[in-house]
């Protein structure tokens, strides 16, 4: 709904948006008597999400001469209510009822959950531009979210400003033909990140049952520590960007430099169990990010029959922890180190495998031949968690890049996309296991030490890894991500056939990966046994597609 | 023109309506969880006490890598280690592999300090003067049962670790600067809690009941007496002293 005002107030608009959504879901599953526990198990779940958004927007826009001015003011409220109920039942006489009568099962259980989320925002923005050459924007937001603590106002004020200079529109750029587009952008501002879900600020109790005289009795116990002081995580960022086009856009692209500092990060912090809880959400520390992003598009060959275009993207980010708890001290428990990236691998340094005849007494007295050999970094004659672990690498890439080459010859088109991710270290879960007496399929590259085959990289099958070494490995890779060859039928021919167009194509994704990583794939997330979503580990798939695109007129 | 103003006024009313409920609009109320501070009536406190029994069961039911009971029994007459052992009990029969970050010790530490927090929460609620719906006798009985479990946890901790941090109030904000108390301070809490429990817990036949009869599974005064005897025996009897970490205090005391 929109109201425009006439006369002197022309340019002033009021707008109200009301949005309401209702999303129901239903899920049912039944595993028959012939499967799994041989009893028949049914499960159903229903959920609904009710949300509304209300926005009141006032805007004013005015042009005078070469000046353009506009203002936007916003007041908005949002609410989301979610609720779900699940039921499950096992022990059915036969499979006839599927999940349609939970009551017919021998044992039943049910759960339900509900929550509410609300957000309130006020925002004002002023845009000013002169002659499409100078652009200026100031914005201020004031956001309040229900997820923050009762001890706070729940609100955060986030101002920002941006400047743009469209250099190619300047008079002095008119008399040259090299640069056809050049634009300089700079922005500075503060933003807020909600970063937590509902109910993190309230200490809550779980329920559990205990039998007394055979009667199940409900017991409650505090299980989650809430932090009533949680507030917005804020980032102050600066961004400098250049967009350019040369030789009539034959070379064009952009360069982006950024630097930002984030304070009061909302993180689940490990705390000593002496508190009664092992972790709590907190606004913690300060991190910095510096980086550069480059995009370059070139048209290398533009002959009429053969054309070749290239797109190159490059991104690099340097991420550092500036402070944690205000005392510039590392947090070993969470593996957070001042001056280092947020997510690092901190572990023993493996230098080989103990071979027969070597004497580990001065370095690792309990080691036997076939055990992993770790560096005794502090030289105290034994391997200890305090003295012999170091940072082995970061889990976020140091830089990433992509290169797309597209070739056109008459009606044939070939596009090749290469992707590279460099400077990543990850623990390799595949190496942690031997074959578990045949229960597990390990990649063929995972060998093991034997007296005959004295490997210097893999331990013997008897090695128990009591130190919990994670097998940090270089997960950098370069991948032939996508190759697509297509042929477009000549338009005249297509017309004769009565078709709008016809394209035949063959394409392959994830065709080949160049990497030192052992296992499925350096990118595939593989949870080790008993952790995360480990029953659903799934590799990255290679796909080959032959296709025909026909559009009818 | 006038019509527009009427519309605008109507809209302004809507705007005001939404902003006027702003104060409570952002309030948070957990729909699906109890909060400890609202479990402060008789039924709530009783369910919190039942929670202590539930928590005690987790001391012994840890099945992670099949090891918890083996920790205490492998290497004794009860059980021996087979060649294919795996899990947390390994360092307990192969001491060269025992490290300060050992899983079993950390689990026992963990269970007992969670117990301390659960009991502190109950004791604090009962001692809150604004709680008037329960008689002093009722309060003492609830407090006694919680103190029995708190002493149980501190006795476990002192036996295995010696002097440990003593916390007798539930923490409302996280803390990281805990320091070991002396063994005497830990022992003092145990004796005070158990003395209170002995004086305020019911006789065996006076425990509460449910529809199936008396709740003999709940703590009574003789359980508290036995625990008190066991704890004090440990720091007076030379054999017990040698078996537990309380031997430390013998050394300290004898100097």
Image (cartoon, coloured by chain):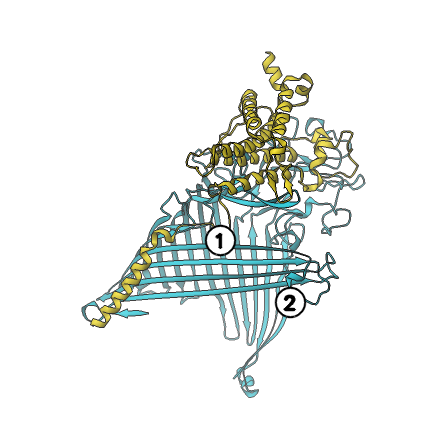
Chain colours: A cyan, B yellow
Residue farthest along the top direction in this orientation: B255
Contact between marks 2 and 1 (CB within 8 A): the answer is no
Foreground disc of the pair 2, 1:
2
Q: Residue at x 42, y 56 (%)?
A: A255
Q: Residue at x 67, y 40 (%)?
A: B61
Q: Is residue A284 visible?
A: yes
Q: Chain of mark 2?
A: A
Task: Quadrant for the C terminus of chain B, please.
Answer: top right
Is residue A425 placed above or below A115 in the rendered structure?
A: above
User: Depth check: A552 or B25 in front?
Assistant: B25
Residue A544's disc is 2
Horizontal and vertical percent position of residue A235? 40, 47
Q: Residue at x 77, y 47 (%)?
A: A437
Q: Say which residue label 1 marks.
A: A315
Q: Is residue A272 visible?
A: no
Q: Chain of mark 1?
A: A
Horizontal and vertical percent position of residue B62? 66, 40
């Amino acid at each position: 709904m929109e109201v425009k005002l006439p006369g002197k107030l022309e340019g002033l608009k009021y707008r109200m948006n009301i949005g309401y959504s209702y999303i129901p879901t239903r899920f049912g599953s039944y595993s028959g008597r012939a499967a799994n526990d041989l009893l028949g198990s049914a499960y159903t779940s229903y959920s609904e999400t009710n949300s509304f958004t209300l926005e009141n927007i006032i805007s004013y826009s005015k042009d005078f001469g070469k000046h353009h001015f506009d203002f936007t003011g916003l007041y908005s409220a949002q609410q989301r209510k979610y609720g779900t109920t699940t039921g499950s039942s096992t022990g059915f006489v036969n499979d006839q009822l599927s999940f349609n009568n939970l009551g017919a099962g021998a044992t039943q259980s049910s759960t339900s959950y509900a929550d509410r989320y609300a957000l309130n925002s006020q925002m004002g923005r002023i845009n000013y531009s002169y002659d499409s050459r100078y652009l200026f924007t100031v914005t201020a937001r004031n956001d309040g979210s229900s997820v923050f603590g009762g001890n706070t106002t729940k609100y955060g004020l986030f101002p920002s400003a941006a400047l743009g200079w469209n250099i190619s529109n300047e008079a002095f750029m008119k008399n040259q033909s090299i640069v056809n587009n050049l634009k300089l952008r700079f922005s500075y501002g503060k933003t807020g990140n909600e970063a937590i879900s509902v109910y993190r600020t309230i200490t809550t109790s779980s329920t559990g049952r205990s039998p007394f005289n055979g009667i199940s009795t409900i017991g409650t116990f505090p299980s989650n520590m809430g932090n009533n002081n949680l507030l917005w995580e804020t980032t102050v960022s600066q961004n400098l960007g250049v967009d350019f086009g040369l030789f009539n856009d034959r070379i064009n692209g952009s360069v982006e430099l950024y630097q930002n500092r984030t304070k009061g990060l909302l993180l689940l912090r490990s705390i000593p169990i002496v508190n009664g809880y092992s972790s709590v959400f907190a606004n913690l520390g300060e991190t910095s990010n510096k980086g550069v992003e480059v995009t370059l598009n070139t048209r290398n060959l533009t002959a009429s029959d053969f054309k070749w275009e290239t797109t190159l993207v490059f991104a690099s980010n340097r991420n550092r922890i500036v402070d944690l708890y205000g005392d510039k001290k590392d947090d070993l428990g969470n593996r957070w180190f001042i001056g280092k990236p947020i997510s690092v691998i901190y572990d023993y340094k493996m230098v080989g495998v103990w071979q027969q005849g070597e004497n580990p007494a001065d370095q690792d007295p309990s080691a036997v031949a076939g055990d992993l050999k770790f560096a005794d970094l502090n030289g105290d004659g034994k391997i200890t968690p305090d003295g012999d672990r170091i940072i082995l690498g970061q889990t976020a890439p140091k830089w990433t890049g992509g290169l797309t080459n597209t070739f056109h010859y008459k009606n044939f088109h070939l596009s090749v996309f290469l992707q590279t991710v460099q400077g990543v270290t990850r623990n390799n879960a595949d190496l942690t296991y031997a074959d578990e007496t045949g229960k597990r399929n390990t990649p063929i590259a995972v060998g093991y030490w034997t007296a005959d085959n004295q490997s210097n990289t893999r331990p013997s099958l008897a090695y128990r890894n009591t130190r919990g070494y994670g097998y940090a490995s270089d997960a950098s890779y370069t991948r032939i991500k996508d190759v697509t060859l297509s042929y477009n039928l000549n338009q005249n021919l297509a017309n004769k056939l009565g078709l709008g167009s016809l394209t035949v194509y063959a394409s392959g994704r994830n065709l080949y990966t160049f990497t030192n990583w052992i296992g499925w794939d350096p990118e595939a997330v593989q949870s080790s046994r008993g952790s995360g979503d480990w029953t659903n580990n799934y590799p990255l798939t290679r796909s080959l597609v032959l296709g025909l695109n026909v559009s009818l007129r | 023109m006038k019509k527009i103003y009427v519309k605008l006024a109507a809209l302004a009313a809507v705007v005001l309506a939404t902003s006027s409920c702003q104060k409570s609009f952002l309030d948070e109320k957990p729909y699906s969880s109890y909060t400890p501070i609202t479990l402060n009536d008789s039924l709530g406190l009783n369910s919190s006490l039942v929670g202590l029994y539930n928590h005690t069961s987790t001391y012994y039911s840890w099945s992670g890598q099949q090891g918890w009971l083996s920790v205490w029994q492998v290497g004794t007459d009860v059980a021996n280690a087979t060649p294919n052992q795996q899990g947390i009990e390994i360092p307990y029969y192969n001491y060269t592999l025992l490290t300060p970050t050992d899983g079993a010790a950390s689990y026992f530490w963990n269970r007992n300090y969670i117990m301390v927090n659960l009991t502190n929460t109950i004791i604090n609620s009962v001692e809150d003067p604004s709680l008037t719906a329960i008689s002093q006798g009722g309060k003492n009985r609830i407090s006694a049962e919680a103190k029995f479990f708190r002493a149980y946890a501190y006795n476990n901790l002192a036996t295995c670790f010696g002097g440990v941090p003593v916390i007798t109030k539930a923490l409302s904000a996280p803390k990281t600067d805990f320091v070991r108390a002396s063994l005497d301070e830990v022992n003092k809490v145990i004796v005070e809690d158990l003395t209170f429990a002995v004086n305020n817990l019911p006789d065996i036949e006076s425990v509460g009941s449910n529809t199936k009869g008396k709740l003999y599974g709940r703590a009574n005064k003789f359980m508290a007496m036995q625990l008190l005897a066991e704890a004090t025996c440990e720091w007076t009897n030379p054999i017990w002293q040698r078996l537990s970490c309380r031997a430390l205090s013998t050394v300290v005391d004898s100097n």
